Image (spheres, grey):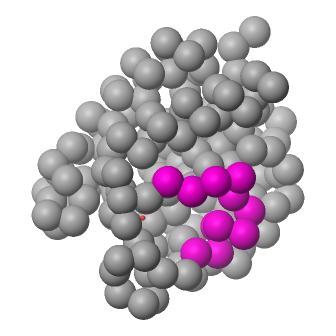
Amino acid sequence: MSKNILIINGPNLNMLGTRQPEVYGSDTLADIEAMCSDHGQGLSLSIDFRQTNDEGEMVTWIQESRATHDAIIINAAAYTHTSVAVLDALLAVEMPVIEVHLSNIHQREEFRQHSYVAKAATGMICGLGAQGYTLALDALANCLDS
Ligand code: DQA
């Protein structure tokens, strides 16, 4: 049976394409979703791709995924740097988590260089733009297989 991957995108990522393209690239979130669906098919992973601007909704999706999904890819966007609630939810579900950021958060403002999500993540990919999402799917295919 194919594994179910939840891909969660946080606040303002619905504005990709027009939002600071010099930082985040020109792909829209719909482009990234299409890329993930295609790539997932090749890896026999089924993709559930979502975006929210709401921290509580993000926490609820993570909690619910325990019963319905096998792993999570998360770009928590600004909540990466602020949300103990998102961290606690990720720790509670006890499944593989790959953290993704389009930009290299370690080259940016100091407040972006700390990630709460990282404390719950199996691994982190940042600075590679949209490709980070497909690399995260490759990593999960590997880790769910073994
Ligand atoms: C981001 C980096 C965050 O610092 C920022 O708040 C975002 C996007 C990224 O993908 O590079 O919204 O997560």
Tell me the residue at 52%/62% (across/down): 76
Residue 23 drawn above or below residue 8: below
Q: Say if residue 102 shows up in the picture.
A: yes
Q: Position of residue 30 (x, y in %)?
A: 29, 36
User: Horizontal placement of 97 versus 15: left or right?
Assistant: right
Tell me how many marks there are: 0
The residue at 34%/80% (across/down) is 108
Would you say residue 120 sits in the magenta stretch? yes
Residue 84 picture quarter = bottom right
Residue 136 location, x and y as percent?
53, 40
The quarter of the picture where the N terminus appears is top right
Magenta stretch bounds: 115-125
Residue 20 in picture, x, y percent from top left:
17, 66
Q: Tell which residue pokes out farthest to the top in this image.
A: 1
Residue depicted at 48% across the width and 37% down the height? 135
Task: Write down the quadrant of residue 87 in the picture.
Answer: bottom right
Quadrant containing the C terminus in the rendered view: top right
Asked if the magenta segment contains residue 60, the reply would be no
Quadrant containing ligand 1 reads: bottom left
> From this viewpoint, which residue is outermost toward the bottom?
110
| Residue drawn at point x = 85 percent, y = 50 percent | 94
Determine whether 70 is above or below 99 in the image.
Answer: above
Give above or below for 69 relative to 128: above
Left or right of 14: which side holds 122?
right
